[in-house]
Image (cartoon, rainbow, N blue to C red):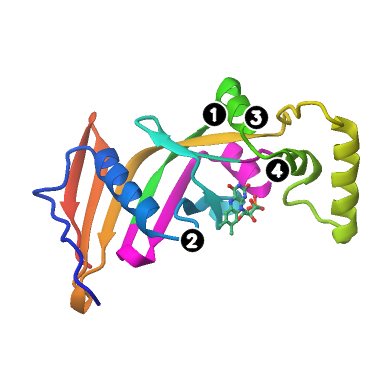
Amino acid sequence: MHDHPPLDTTTAPDDPSELFAHWYRAALDTVSDEPTAVALATVGAGGRPAARMVLLKGFDEAGFVFYTNFASRKGAELDANPHAALLFWWPPLLRQVRIEGRVTRVDATEADAYFASRPRGSQIGAWASPQSEPLADRSELEARVAAQSARHGEREVPRPPFWGGYRLAPDAFEFWQGRPDRLHDRVHYRHADGVWHRVRLAP
Ligand SMILES: Cc1cc2nc3c(=O)[nH]c(=O)nc-3n(C[C@H](O)[C@H](O)[C@H](O)COP(=O)(O)O)c2cc1C
């Protein structure tokens, strides 16, 4: 294993968003396949966790944004229990980032602007796919796409009312930097009493 720059609580920034921005930039520059892909864990009925990948569409001081179908399994779980976790893994950098917090829905104006920026095929697909519902076969999906294409014609495709974004406002982060001999660096941040506290964890 190559050595990578160490991660240390004494030199890590006070604000984990600053460190995330730095690592995310490095991932965008280095990871060739889907650097924005992130595992999203939600909690369902009975406290059972479920995870799936989504694409990160933005982040700022307020949190981490992804888009989906509100009626999907993840949407239903998030609406019932807003606690969620995100997990990034960037192999070429040997870096993992864990983020935990609560989600809220992105406001309509912001979601409309993002939906409008998507390729037309994705916009039609959002209308056509009853995400997480059973389908008889692939032709059912193709028929639904054809019907939505015909319905919208050449007109601008509006955002479906059942589709939009969630923003996860973080209250915990863990940055993991792979190091030789499994002596990895881990820095955990926790938000409490209005400030971020950070601590090194054993690998
Ligand atoms: C790399 C990757 C990125 C994905 N990005 C998204 C996304 O941004 N939004 C989304 O709804 N599904 C995305 N998916 C599909 C989800 O993983 C999942 O199959 C789908 O959202 C249904 O999940 P659910 O039934 O738990 O709601 C992505 C899958 C992969 C493999």
Instruction: Tell me the amino acid under the disc marked 3.
Output: Ala
- Label count reads 4
Instruction: Name the spot of residue 35 as percent of width and height, x first.
Output: 44, 55
Screen quadrant of the N terminus: bottom left
Left or right of residue 175, residue 90 in this image: right
Residue 138: give x, y in percent of width and height: 85, 60
Residue at mark 2: 33
- Crowd rating for badge 1 (residues with CA inside 10 Å; few <14, some 14–19, many 20+): some
First-in-chain label (1 vs 4): 1
For badge 2, the amino acid type reads Asp
Q: Local crowd at mark 3 within 10 Å, few (<14), some, or many (≥20)?
A: some
Residue 191 percent coordinates (x, y): 27, 37
Residue 122 badge: 4
Residue at 31% x, 47% y is 173
Q: Which residues are magenta?
A: 68-96
Is residue 143 in view? Answer: yes
Q: Nearer the viewer, mark 1 or mark 3?
A: 3
144 over 202 or under it: above or below: above
Task: Give the CA distance from mark 1 to mark 2.
Answer: 26 Å
Whole-angstrom CA distance, mark 4 to mark 2, is 20 Å
Question: Measured along the vertical axis of the image, is residue 129 above or below residue 95?
Answer: above
Residue at image coords 23%, 75%: 182
Q: Amino acid at mark 4?
A: Ser
Residue at the disc numbered 1: 106
Give the camera-side residue of 59 and 75: 59
Instruction: Find disc 3 in the rendering and name its residue.
Output: 116
Q: Quadrant of the C terminus?
A: bottom left
- Label 1–label 4 contact, CB within 8 A: no
User: Residue at horizontal 48%, vertical 53%?
Assistant: 38
Q: Are marks 4 and 2 in contact (CB under 8 Å)?
A: no
Which is more N-terminal, label 4 or label 3? 3
Where disc 3 sits, the SS reads helix
